[in-house]
Image (spheres, rainbow, N blue to C red):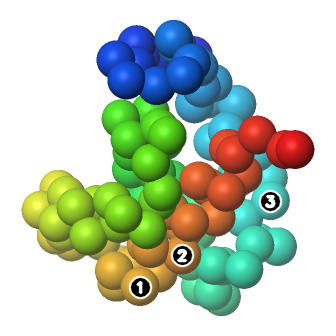
């Protein structure tokens, strides 16, 4: 499923993200990622990845470092029983956000 949002003050009119394709990528590659720890499954990481995609669309054009504090509050509120702590989630968000950046 592709998701798009209209940007009001950005140089690009629209940002597109195929969330299902991105989730499929991480499902196949999470065990080789820098954030993976033994004993965790894709199911553990999926909410953090979805948070990253939602944030990328909402805050596109901003630096992830500038919005990460807001994302912490959202994740802790929405996923109080997560096996992941915030530092793990932050690493996942950064990895997913970096993958979405256009290559120069």
Q: Residue at x 49, y 40 (%)?
A: 61
Q: Give the image quarter of residue 7.
A: top left
Quadrant location, the C terminus: top right
Q: Earlier in the sequence, mark 2 or mark 3?
A: 3
Quadrant location, the N terminus: top right
Residue annotated with mark 1: 87
In the rendered image, the residue lying farthest to the left is 77
Pointer 2 with pointer 3, Cβ within 8 A: no
Q: Give the image quarter of residue 84.
A: bottom left
What is the number of the mark on residue 52? none
Q: Nearer the viewer, mark 3 or mark 1?
A: 1
Pointer 1 with pointer 2, Cβ within 8 A: yes
In the image, residue 83 above or below residue 103: below
| Cα–Cα span, label 3 and label 1 | 20 Å
What is the number of the mark on residue 91? 2
| Cα–Cα span, label 1 and label 2 | 6 Å
Q: Nearer the viewer, mark 2 or mark 3?
A: 2
What is the number of the mark on residue 29? 3
Q: Residue at x 48, y 57 (%)?
A: 63
Name the one closer to the observer, 50 or 66: 66
Q: Secondary structure at mark 2?
A: helix
């Amino acid at each position: 499923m592709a998701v798009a949002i209209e940007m009001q003050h950005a140089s690009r009119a629209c940002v597109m993200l195929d969330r299902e394709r991105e989730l499929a990528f991480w499902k196949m590659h999470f065990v080789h990622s820098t954030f993976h720890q033994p004993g965790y499954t894709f199911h553990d990481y999926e909410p953090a990845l979805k948070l990253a995609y939602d944030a990328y669309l909402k805050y596109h054009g901003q630096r992830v470092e500038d919005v990460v504090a807001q994302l912490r509050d959202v994740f802790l509120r929405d996923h109080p029983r997560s096996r992941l702590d915030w530092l793990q989630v932050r690493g996942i968000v950064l990895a997913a956000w970096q993958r979405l950046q256009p290559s120069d």
